[in-house]
Amino acid sequence: MTKPKESNVAPPARRRLSWNDPGTRSIFYQVLALLAVGGVVWFLVHNTMSNLSARNISTGFDFLNREAGFAIGETPIAYSPASTYGRAITVGLLNTLRVALIGIVLATLLGTLIGIARLSSNWLIRKISSIYVEVMRNVPLLLQLFFWYAIISETLPGPRQALHPLPGVFVSNRGMQMPTVHGDGLLWLLVGVLAAIILMIVMAKWARKNQEKTGQIFPVLRWSLVLFFVVPVVTWLLSGTTMTLDVPELKGFNFVGGMTLSPEFAALLIGLVIYTAAFIAEVVRSGIQAVNRGQWEAAEALGLKRGQILRLIVLPQALRVIIPPMTSQYLNITKNSSLAVAIGYPDIVSVINTTLNQTGQAIEGIMMIMAAYLTVSLSISVFMNWYNKRIALVER
Amino acid sequence: MSTPTQLVSTEKAPSSSVGVLAWMRSQLFSSPINSLLTILSVWLLLATVPAMVDWFLISANATASTADECRKSTGACWAMIVEKHRLILFGLYPYDEQWRPMIATGILVGSIILSGWRKLWNIWLLVVWTVSLTVVAILMWGGMLGLTYVENTQWGGLPLTLILSTFGIALAFPLGIVLALGRRSNMPAIKSICIVYIELIRGVPLISLLFMSAVMLPLFLPEGMSIDKLLRAQIAIILFAAAYMAETIRGGLQAIPKGQFEGADSLGLSYWQQMRLIVLPQALKIVIPPLVGLFIALFKDTSLVVIIGIFDLTQAAKAALTDQAWRGFSVEVYIFISAIYFVFCYSMSKYSQSLEKRLATGHER
Amino acid sequence: MADAIIRMKDVNKWYGKFHVLRNINLEVAQGERIVVCGPSGSGKSTLIRCINRLEEHQKGQIIVDGTEITNDLRDVEAIRREVGMVFQHFNLFPHLTVLENLTIGPIWVLKTPKAEAEARAMKYLERVRISEQALKFPGQLSGGQQQRVAIARSLCMDPKIMLFDEPTSALDPEMVKEVLDVMIGLAEESGMTMLCVTHEMGFARKVADRVIFMDQGEIIEENKPEAFFDNPQNERTKLFLSQILH
């Protein structure tokens, strides 16, 4: 068979500057769109500038170095009304991160538990968890926050009649006081925890190699738990250092010593966790149900035990379905923590709001709020896309 | 040729596998762990439910005329709700004219229910909504047809929550469609503009948008022009809803097989004809369940306007609580309002689930 | 039968009130090949799924290789090690490669070292003529290839009994032959006891020692293939055969 002759004819020239050419039309529409958007943006900016100068408000971020002049209820780092606005905003950011991170951990635990409960073979457990999910999902979060805050500030007793559920723990309408630990011993305990984690990883690796060689299965989970609890304690004892307990005591009208969880923080955390756990429960449930019944049956037919089936077959497939919506719930907790401004917890929105009101630097303030949340959202989106590509099931 | 197969006499299943006792055995006590869980749950329920029922109903007081009388009983003080229900439901609307927001609420709820009727899913739905939204606007504002003018700062409570959500979704709908189509477009400029808008809005909390509208919108407008607070909030809600709607509609567009577009192309239809006649009707039908979910979420999110000082249903709760004479009954008020939200959201979500089941049958092979 | 490897005595099963297996009495000798056929809803799948306890029977006895199936988990586990099953919808694990699908059972249930498990897996993959796909994922294979992998996966556990639940019903017509060839090869080369629920009557004629016809939960007729197909006794059997052999 002879090779077809190379064509000498060039393809017809495409660009025709006519309305009927789709390329021309597309360029025209795009230019139109850009002009429209650009025009609107210019209009808004122009108005803003003139309005700002009419009210004698300067632009720029210099105000961040000025003295703040307002107090903040909760300060993870040192702060006083004499500190700068910049520092105040940092405190707000730390408060947001604090409640968001703890909220994510607790909501995941509670939500996973409830999600599994919804699939339980026990009718009572199924019904109770279903009711929980339906009620929590259909009442606005803001209302739930008000509710929890009202319960904490109205129904809990005053400091003098504080509830005393555990030694050193007091619950009153001023919040919850807990004992804290001080001293070098704490450092050694944490070193021990780190050592335990490293040992657990080493043991798991060894167990896997051993199984590949001899086929024997080593009870990694059991020994990991032992390591986790024993090694830190042993490390601390060997170090010979001491730890002191700082127990809160009632002095006069209030508590001194120990650690305090303010009513605002508690209400925000409880509200966020209980609300988001309901959504996470649904995500977990649909993930587990997404795994075909046939997978269970095939694994059972091979003789795998229930724990092995969950670990090797079902959970890997379920997690693929669970993780994307789960991360969007994490994003929601972070965004929803902004409701703190309604119950007086000083998160970043609340602090910037105060700053905004005092300095009139509305644009800069709002830009900072949006920048902070956008950074979190976009990083989570990027992570999501990467993760999805990596674990996608290979298909034709 | 063959005789019909004879029914073999049926032996009854052993009594240990059917009946109430069997149900309890398999559902409640099927294993040691399950039995333990059942016992724990029953104990938990017994510890809390009777006390709650007592507080809710038995010891509750619904007829007291003053707060002190109510405080004497140990149960819930529903008398406060009876006393304050007009304030909670209708806000600061003039007392004599409150029949107007009541009718407006009825019209909005009725339109929402009508929208669920599948026979109405065509151009008539648009007509129904245009008419009802106009009528609602006239009723609330007044100033014509003999109705006295009521400024929108006096609007409040349930009608306002409904208005913010329904106007929000209704006006976000066309914007969402445009954004979704733009995001799928082949023209890079338009695609980028839509992506930037959608990701920006979805990445920030609604509160920041509400603040932005409350604080920045006045700055955006030329001197002398001003927009009232309610309209600012409404604009923010519309822009917010449009971004989420765009993503949902985009999902529906992605589910349309390529063959539909190719079929329309081969018929010689223009882009907008394709969209209007072939693609969008199918895509929108697919995304109705998630859109209902969006509406439920938006309905709940309108409660945030409390923070910028607008008098919606949640704010009405706070207002009722500021009355010093009826101090300390926040829990009753919050439960009442939660019940209202719950009834709306739960019925919509149940509707959406049943809808999903019915629509799914059409798409199975 | 003295050396029956499967013994079912007066087995009854109900789904709620629905009597799905009625007084099943069946004995299968070691090395016997049995084909079970019948109209849909006759309980034939339920019957073989009771043998490896994927379904529970409420009355009667099922004894597999000397062990009776009870609620005791250890008995069930012991039986499942001896019984392999091939499903209508393959049920391969999509997140594992073909090789990993085959070795997961030996490694985690039989506690076989990895190298030995992989060698065994490659041996069976060659047996079903699919060894070049060892590192692919199930999603990349055709239906016929997936079912052959599923058969190899069960064989890796060295079972004494193989159960097939309509193994070719979900396949496109051009792939049915490749799977049936594997099953015929299995029957001819190994002394495996096989119970197969299928509509493939050509396979039954070639391989089966006995054909069993079920209807409405009962065993209506059983016979050697030639006698069964050429001279059915019961009216219902005749009706069924006239419907599927056209």
Image: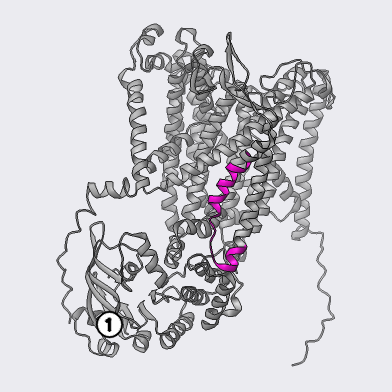
Residue receiving disc 1:
C241
Chain letter behind tag 1 = C
Residue at the spot x=24%, y=60% of the render?
C18
A366 relative to A205, above or below: above
Res. B324 in view: yes
| Residue furthest out toward the bottom | A1
Q: How is the image coloured?
A: one colour
What kind of secondary structure does the magenta stretch mostly adopt? helix
Report which quarter residue C33 is drawn in: bottom left
Residue C89 coordinates in the image, percent (x, y): 45, 69
A211 drawn magenta: yes
Residue at the spot x=28%, y=48% of the render?
B25
Residue at the spot x=48%, y=32% of the render?
A139
Say which amino acid is labelled 1: Leu
Looking at the rendered structure, the secondary structure element under dot 1 is helix
Residue B305 coordinates in the image, percent (x, y): 59, 26
B170 relative to C239, above or below: above
Q: Magenta segment, which residues?
A: A209-232
Quarter of the picture containing the N terminus of chain B is: bottom left
